[in-house]
Image (cartoon, rainbow, N blue to C red):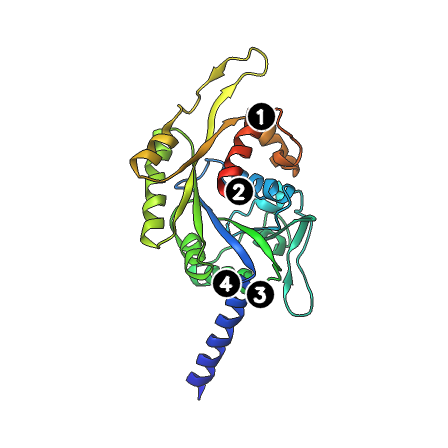
Amino acid sequence: MVMQQDALKAQQDEKKLQENLSRIKNKLIVLSGKGGVGKSTVAVNLAVNLSLKGYKTGLLDVDIHGPSVPTMLGLENHKLGNDGEKIMPVKFNENMKAISIGFMLEKPEDAVIWRGPLKYNAIKQFASDVNWGELDYLIVDSPPGTGDEPLSVCQIIKPDAAIVVTTPQDVALTDVRKSITFCNHVNIPIRGVIENMSGFTCPHCGKTVDIFKKGGGERISREMNVPFLGSIPIEIDIMEKGDSGNPFMNNHRGESESVKAFEKIISKITK
């Protein structure tokens, strides 16, 4: 009897999950092989850019142990509500809403000390119990590596494609290969590779310095036969806007190389 009840509940949960996900047209997971490459910054600005272009966009932060999306969106003091049936995501603008474990913490410095099963259940709840509504795009910001969180996303949400973020330096590119191999193993197509922190142009003298080398992301894309989406240069304003909770792409309209880079990437993603 207990086994029958468990089976029935599992069927009901799966039906609820699939009904929720069926209202999302495009599900994209943003991955990186290692930390420190600016993956969350890229994910946030891609989501913001999509929303400003009129796309109904959701941003799902599954970095359980280091959620940064609330801070980058200036929403760290917001808490999750509900509509009587489902969890309501936090609204960023008319076209964009977000979910993060960070909205559930009492204090920003609180640590989430969870093992794999708890993280799996949280991600499943974010997918099935959140009222995402009708979305054109769901951007999933995953923590670095190929562990519990990205694997759970691929099993539960089944993204339509992955975007892999790297810097040009060799130590990052080695791990990018692992992210691409991971996607191949779990049958998630690669939408493309983004090379972040690709050169720095001095605002005073105009000279460009390739601090982390240049061109590595494009080379890896060729070698592993996946699309290359573009290079985003280092720009001080990207960091400052992220720290202040006012995303870079929410403030700039074509007057910098970084804006142009994001625009080109978005055009490839949405075509």
How far is disc 4 from disc 3 in space, using C-alphas?
Answer: 8 Å
* Residue 216, x across and y down, in percent: 36, 29
On screen, residue 128 above or below 219: below
Q: Is residue 98 left or right of residue 1?
A: right
Q: Which residue is mark 1?
A: 236
How far is disc 3 from disc 1 in space, using C-alphas?
Answer: 38 Å
The amino acid type, in three-letter code, at marker 4 is Lys
How far is disc 2 from disc 3 in space, using C-alphas?
Answer: 22 Å
User: In the structure shown, which secondary structural element does the residue marked by tag 4 occupy?
Assistant: helix
User: In the structure shown, which secondary structural element does the residue marked by tag 1 occupy?
Assistant: helix
* Residue 222, x across and y down, in percent: 32, 34
- The mark lying in front, picked from 2 and 4, is 2
Going from the N terminus, do you reach mark 2 or mark 4 first? 2
User: In the structure shown, which secondary structural element does the residue marked by tag 3 occupy?
Assistant: loop
Q: Residue at x 52, y 47 (%)?
A: 66
Q: Which residue is mark 4?
A: 124
Q: How many marks?
A: 4
Q: Quadrant of residue 52?
A: top right
Going from the N terminus, do you reach mark 2 or mark 1 first? 2
Can you see residue 60? no
- Mark 2–mark 1 contact, CB under 8 Å? no
Q: Residue at x 66, y 58 (%)?
A: 80
* Residue 49, x across and y down, in percent: 60, 40
Q: Which residue is mark 3?
A: 129
User: In the structure shown, which secondary structural element does the residue marked by tag 2 occupy?
Assistant: helix
Residue 43 numbered mark, or none: 2
- The mark lying in front, picked from 2 and 1, is 2
Q: Quadrant of residue 134?
A: bottom right
Going from the N terminus, do you reach mark 1 or mark 4 first? 4
